[in-house]
Amino acid sequence: MSRVAVVGAGTMGSGIAQVFAQRAWDTALLDVAPELLDKARAAIRANLERQVQKGALRPEERDAVLARIRTDTKPDAAADAELVVEAATENPAVKFKIFRDLDRIAPAGAVLASNTSSISITAIAAQTRRAERVIGMHFMNPVPVMQLVEVIRGLETSDETAGRILDIARALGKTPVVVNDSPGFVSNRVLMPMINEAICCVQDGVAAPDAVDAVMKLGMNHPLGPLALADLVGLDVCLAILEVLQRDLGDDKYRPAPLLRKMVAAGRLGRKTGRGFYVYRD
Ligand code: CAA
């Protein structure tokens, strides 16, 4: 059986672990916070249960998937992984330390992938002695549903590593798209300015959030409006990505809307805190 270790048990990490385990990978889900591991396991169980209720999954398959996921608070659990997917907090210092640790712990031939949405893969790879086996594997939220995996090649990523990750992404039932390492890659370089502009519309009194979202949903066939999507992604994450785009591309067209800064300062981070542009009661 193939072995993967997923580092970080937040929304993305738990979704990534679920997708691997559903495709028969032996999956270690790691996080320093045991309560996040419990929450992740409960979220995966609930997702699988929904599939059982719909008749898309047999109860014994649900049990087998859950049995393939072990959780651990120690990075040593990545010692037997052939692939590690890091999905920790979007903070360069945190990711750099994780990659230095993983480089020491994971087998020499293992590929180390990051689910970062904006941090340079080349800079992450430079923390290790295996830059040719470091790559970006950027899943979209919600991971079990979304088709895309944005595969990001760092400056030193080898063809062999890229080929392995493309094969794995396809085997997970996803469609990989290869891009080069550049701030925000393609996904967030295009998405975040749209979200930022939608926030500017609210800030400038052009329209209320539900009107901005209705225009984009009904007029452009977006499944979610940009403000509802910002709430899903997390306003703190949107702010962090815009700051990377502005700083690393050196262009003020990416300047985060002051209203976005204010909402993050107030702790209105979107779904995860129960309030962003909308209020979430569950
Ligand atoms: N986890 C697992 N499955 C989920 C889910 C979740 N969180 N949310 C929904 N689903 C499943 C449902 O069970 C349902 O499955 P079936 O088709 O088997 O019945 C299916 O998804 C559709 O769900 P719904 O009918 O309830 O809801 P919907 O029609 O609104 O679709 C959606 C849900 C597909 C997520 C849709 O809202 C959508 O496309 N949203 C936009 C998502 C998006 O743009 N994501 C990218 C965010 S950006 C990012 O992730 C990258 C970054 O770096 C910031």
Image (tube, rainbow, N blue to C red):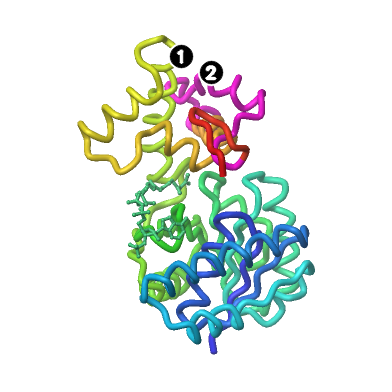
Seen in the picture, residue 100 relative to 180 is either above or below; the reply is below
Q: Quadrant of the image for the C terminus?
A: top right
Residue 58 in picture, x, y percent from top left? 43, 83
Q: Which residue was labeled with disc 2?
A: 259
Q: Element under label 2?
A: helix
Seen in the picture, residue 98 relative to 74 is either above or below; the reply is above
Q: Evaluate if marks 2 and 1 touch, with contact meaning CB atoms under 8 Å apart.
A: yes
Magenta stretch?
A: 246-272
* Of residues 151 and 281, the one drawn nearer to the viewer in this rendering: 281
Q: Amino acid at mark 2?
A: Leu
- Residue sitting farthest toward the top: 205
Q: Is residue 180 left or right of residue 280?
A: left
Residue 183 in picture, x, y percent from top left? 48, 40
Residue 104 falls in image quadrant: bottom right
Query: Within 10 Å of the Cα at label 1, are there few (<14), some (14-19), or many (20+) other Cα atoms?
Result: some
* Of residues 76 and 216, the one drawn nearer to the viewer in this rendering: 216
Query: Within 10 Å of the Cα at label 2, are there few (<14), some (14-19), or many (20+) other Cα atoms?
Result: some
Residue at (29% x, 29% y) in the render:
214
Q: Residue 203 got which mark?
A: 1
